[in-house]
Amino acid sequence: MGSIIITGASSGFGRATARKIARLGQPIVLAARRLSRLEALAGELQALAPVKLLALDVRDRESVFEQFGNLPEPFSDVAVLVNNAGLALGLGAADEANMDDWETMVDTNIKGLMYCTRAILPTMVKNGLGHIINLGSVAASWPYPGGNVYGGSKAFVQQFSRNLRSDLVGKGIRVSNIEPGMCETEFSVVRFDGDEAKAGAVYDGMQPLSAEDIADLICWVISLPAHININQLEVMPVAQAWSAFAVDRGD
């Protein structure tokens, strides 16, 4: 029974997943930038499972490899990596977007996911088992105004997940990409730079998904027999669907 690493564990999907996974009793590694939040979460979970905390910014390649490469027992044999750390910043059109926001999304959603995956794969390959779970988004497949680099970063997650499956055939490692639609967490608060009123308006008049909904799906995917791989799982609230094509009528 190996350990489970969850990145971005201090809030949202990561925190909800940690709370559910702890019931399995397996060692859990909680990684995030905000150590104080992790400490509070660990206080909840330590009666259920062994917990290791990592104060980690996934954008820092050296730190990712150093910390993942030096996990003590019983955390060092990693069975599951949940690549949850990610974010969206801004909703402006591409010609108005903040370049710092774009680079932060690329560094976190793409490069951070790459670093964490590459750092842990040799252990999984050596053990002949493992499961990489990547948190993507419906934005990988369905564009919307202002999605630009965020959607592009999640399209990377989608294709990276598929190509990992190709690379890892015959090595006993599963790869799953979970792609949520509208979900009410801190996601929109971060996107709108802490403006809670603006973030809340995103979900006015509809029932979005919750972090617990996605955590349930992650736990289900993990729980399946080892010969079953969920390649890609796209999920939306019933109140959300695809938009009509945008058409400029020239008026």
Image (spheres, rainbow, N blue to C red):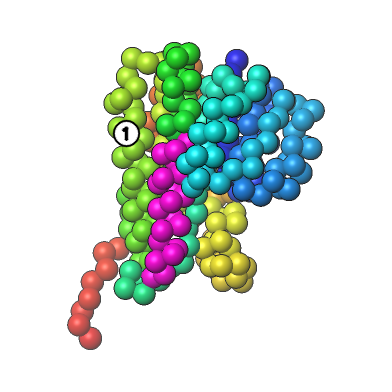
Q: Position of residue 236 (x, y in %)?
A: 45, 49
Out of 21 and 163, give the one closest to the viewer: 163
Residue drawn 73% across and 48% down? Answer: 36
Q: Is residue 101 a member of the stretch shown in magenta? A: yes
Dot 1 alpha-carbon crowd within 10 angstroms: few under 14, some 14 to 19, many 20 or more: some
Classified by dominant secondary structure, the portion drawn in magenta counts as: helix
Tell me the SS state at disc 1. Answer: helix
203 left or right of 117? Answer: right
Q: Position of residue 237 (x, y in %)?
A: 49, 50
Out of 51 and 240, give the one closest to the viewer: 51
Above/below status of 197 relative to 153:
below
Quadrant of the snapshot with the C terminus:
bottom left
Most extreme residue toward the bottom, as rendered?
Answer: 251
Identify the amino acid type marked 1.
Arg
The reply to whether residue 83 is in sight is no
Quadrant of the snapshot with the N terminus:
top right
Above/below status of 18 relative to 251:
above
Q: Residue under label 1, please give it.
A: 162
Out of 65 and 128, give the one closest to the viewer: 65
Location of residue 230 (image quadrant): top left
Location of residue 189 (image quadrant): bottom right
227 left or right of 211? Answer: left
196 left or right of 112? Answer: right
Q: Is residue 10 a member of the stretch shown in magenta? A: no
154 left or right of 251? Answer: right
Q: Which residues are magenta?
A: 97-116
Number of numbered callouts drawn: 1
Residue drawn 34% across and 22% down? Answer: 168
Residue drawn 45% across and 63% down? Answer: 101
Residue drawn 45% across and 57% down? Answer: 104
